[in-house]
Image (cartoon, rainbow, N blue to C red):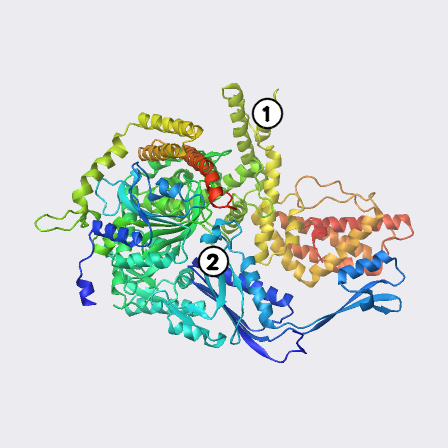
Amino acid sequence: MADAAETKSLSFQDMILTLHAYWAARGCAILQPYDMRVGAGTFHPATTLRSLGPEPWNVAYVQPSRRPTDGRYGENPNRLQHYYQYQVILKPSPADLQEQYLGSLAAIGIDPLLHDIRFVEDDWESPTLGAWGLGWEVWCDGMEVTQFTYFQQMGGFDCKPVAGELTYGLERLAMYIQNVDNVYDLRFSDPVGDVPGLSYGDVFLENEKQFSKWNFEVADTDGLFAGFKAAEAECQRAIEANVPLAAYDQAIEASHLFNLLQARGVISVQERTNYMARVRDLAKGSCKAWIDSQSDAWTAKYPGWTL
Amino acid sequence: MDREISGVDAVTDFLLELRSEEIPARMQAGARAELDKLFRAQMSAAGIEVGDLSIWSTPRRLALIARDLPDATAAVSEELKGPRSSAPLQALEGFLRKTGLTPEQLEDRDGVYFAVIDKPGRATVEVLAEAIPTIIRAFAWPKSMRWGKDSASSESLRWVRPLSGIVAIFGEELVPCEIGGIAAGFATRGHRFHCPGEITIGSALDYVEKLRACHVIVDHEERQAIIRDGAAKAAADAGLTLVADEGLVIENAGLTEWPVPLLGRFDEAFLEVPPEVIQLTARVNQKYFVVNDAAGKLANGFVCTANIAAQDGGAEIVAGNRKVLAARLSDARFFWEQDRKTKLEDLAKKLDRITFHEKLGTVADKVERVANLAEWLASGGIVPNCNPAFARQAAELAKADLVTEMVGEFPELQGLMGGYYARAEGLPDAVADAIRDHYKPVGQGDDVPTAPVTVAVALADKLDTVVGFFGYGLKPTGSKDPFALRRAAISILQLIEHGGIRVHLRPLLFRLSLACYQQAIARAYFERFGKVADVFGAESNDEKYDLLIRLQGIEPRLETDALNPKTAASQLLEFLIDRLKVQQRDAGVRHDLIDAVFGLGGEDDLVRLLARVKALQAFMASDDGANLLAGYKRAANILKQAGKDIVFPAKAGIAGDGEPTIAAPAFAGATDMDKTLLTALDRAEPAASTAVAGERFTDAMAALASLRAPIDAFFDGVMVNDPDEAVRAYRLGLLARFTGAVHGVADFSKIEG
């Protein structure tokens, strides 16, 4: 035990590499982040679109996530407008999903007989994706470290079969494992020879300062409104042209522009509901178009499967 | 297969465990009740009597032990009566189809066919094996889900979270059953981390102790006791006192199989944040108990409940939880500091962004109405000793905290935070208190404010709410009360009763409904003509009403779904009286007596109404009261039979619509009984009406009591329906005066019994 305690905790990047190795060993394809601005790993089409339909789908990836309203100009030790989520999608959900998940915590150095790990009810719902599922937030010593969800619906459609989704908050987990109180003090990488390691602050502090300012003060709201409209129109065009993947990109774009408009404080309470409904319509429309484009192949390959 | 089973010769215990992934804590009590209900229903349908039944829950299992079940159900012989043997052939055929018998198997008893069907007893194991899948399928969870590869089909099994195992043992025998690919077995699992492997259960007898050895306490009540006592002890060991919270005890017991309460401390500097905020953060977000110091003030400690006996005694767990709480409290302190940078009056300006209700405008609109009303309640003396300027100021600021960061995070702190911020701004205490308490009373058990400014704002706020919704016909129906108007009504009644608020509700509600209607018409007028209607300079409310009705009827009619204010106000008054009956029932006040007093038509001052009802109730409990009621009912019956030609005397003590009195004609042949009653009436009538006018209701009852002996003697000694018309008319006149005198106090015809 003494040895274990003295073992140095994983750096931020080693934690990610460990999770990659862990989930790869369990059959997951390790994907890369989606190349668009999104609010959460769930927005990646590898989750949203691929959780629909009968085909098995087991993937893991890191997704940089942007939440403009959470920006604190680099001054808050816990809150960031840009952070990382580690996302695992297993479809259909395996019977030992909880055990597999707990194994991943052990792999990154959390001992469940030293730390109190709990599954606390938390039903997940994404109004902008028309999605919901049942599951828990996983607590480690009272801190939420993972959202654990069995998807029941996506884009307003039943998930058949149900996919299990794990969303790890990487910064929180790393702060926990490394025992630091300020996110910017995290060891991002460890020194090797005479190459120094980097801290999270070395990598991201300046980003937080500049993007907080841009999100809250600078971003051109007329341009954002225009961008929202353009994305909305383009999404419809793409749906009509039967290219749902491209349509979905525009839904993601509209969603992010809406988040930026929120951060700029130019959307009133009443308008907010309206904008969310518009984003949801885009996401649902894209999901529907995706299903329409795939369902022949799905039913051919999985006789008896119905929407 | 035909086992001879006669009666019940042996009893056995049955164990059922339904293991799943973590069941939400808040659903466990309901799940236990559901299992109890479904199991009993299944057994009763099979004819098995259930005796001692224990049902327990943990986050990962529902367990049931039924003790002393019979090994088999008793054989039953069922007898069905069929058609007569002389009946047409179709009737016989129908009966054979129904019973599945052949004609030879029927018994002909005196020309009637009987079918005797013997149902052999069944082994209980078989019954259970069928019952378990049925119970699982029928189980109603508040929310359920599908999972795994079977969920490719919509028909796959649903459970609250994935169902992972079934243990079903009758005696020591496995109850063979399967559902959703899960077969019942002897194996279960212990604590997720302490004993992750499979453990084999032998029978109901060893279940609880085997699990205990594997770090699972199955009995939720035992876990609750461990948390309740352990948390108190952890606090006491540090010289602190636990703030008891039974809801947290139950919730933590629903989150743990092996609960271990642990005390932690947080930075004392956080105590500058209001204690309610700290407690709420700790409880809602983290499910921690808080603790008080020796002086009874909130201390910088918390108790969390771990689900493991940690190798280091919990040091790491406490350190981790402390860090999480510190982050939460930092947020709360940030809000607390941030919110105080803006004055409430500036925050209040943002209320026009929040919709109160589409018909009733924004919260800012509501605030304006409430401020006017609160000020008026104060300046008119309706809320006594209330500074009108304070009432207006408090009402104007009361909702401002809705746009603070803190209330955005913790909506349940509305009002409370406004009070803190008002005080921090240096506003008068009366104003700060009113802002803090103006949502009260919330429900029957809550404190009822009595400080005048608070009462004015609280009453104005709730009156505005009920008047507004009733004004658009949005009143509660059946179990649907989306705007919580019943609760608002009860609060209004409590404020009026506790504060001794003397107000005639009828004109007040009319005035307010009229204002609501006026707004609706003004809006409709503006929408139609693009300008403001300029006819609202009416002097009286009646004049204003006439103007509005005329305006509403201009051709084509102005479109509005606001109700006529007279209709709205009278529906609202009836609703309030209905709520009063419900509310007073708990205080032991009879609803029929409320009807008896309200039924007089004029009594709309709730304080006076209740005083009158209470005096009446005391009177009705006395001998005099009971006898007088009997006398009244007899008199009323006789008068009813006598027909409509009797003119009733005026109702004493009631303003308005009393009918003309006829004096009983002088009559030479009056007996002593007649005269005694007449004299008593001459005395009692004015005595009762003076007493009612002076609100001396006990005296009014005493005046009525003085009629009891004379009316009894009258009925005993004379015949009302005398053959002599003149005598009859005289006596009917006396009775009419008698009932009139009684009506001066209450409408006795509405009293039951």
Estimate the x, y position of residue B432 in percent, counting from the top left. 36, 45
Residue receiving disc 1: B552
Q: Quadrant of residue B211?
A: bottom left
Q: Is residue B125 left or right of residue B360?
A: right
Question: Could you tell me which secondary element the residue under label 1 belongs to?
Answer: helix
Work out whether B229 lies above or below A136.
Answer: below
Q: Give the letter of the chain under mark 2.
A: B
Amino acid carrying mark 1 in the image: Gln
Distance between the alpha carbons at the discs numbered 2 and 1:
53 Å
The residue depicted at 60 percent of the width and 30 percent of the height is B542
The residue depicted at 71 percent of the width and 60 percent of the height is B626
- Residue that protrudes farthest toward the right in the picture: B723
Amino acid carrying mark 2 in the image: Met
Q: Quadrant of residue A32?
A: top left
The residue depicted at 73 percent of the width and 57 percent of the height is B629
Q: Is residue B62 left or right of residue B288?
A: right
- Residue that protrudes farthest toward the bottom in the picture: B9
Question: Could you tell me which secondary element the residue under label 2 belongs to?
Answer: helix
Nearer the observer, A274 or B610 = A274
Estimate the x, y position of residue B467 in percent, counting from the top left. 54, 38
Q: Tell me the crowding category of disc 1: few under 14, some 14 to 19, or many 20 or more residues within 10 angstroms, Cα based.
A: many
Q: Is residue B335 left or right of residue B599?
A: left
- Residue that protrudes farthest toward the left in the picture: A194
Q: Is residue B472 left or right of residue B151?
A: right
Residue receiving disc 2: B27
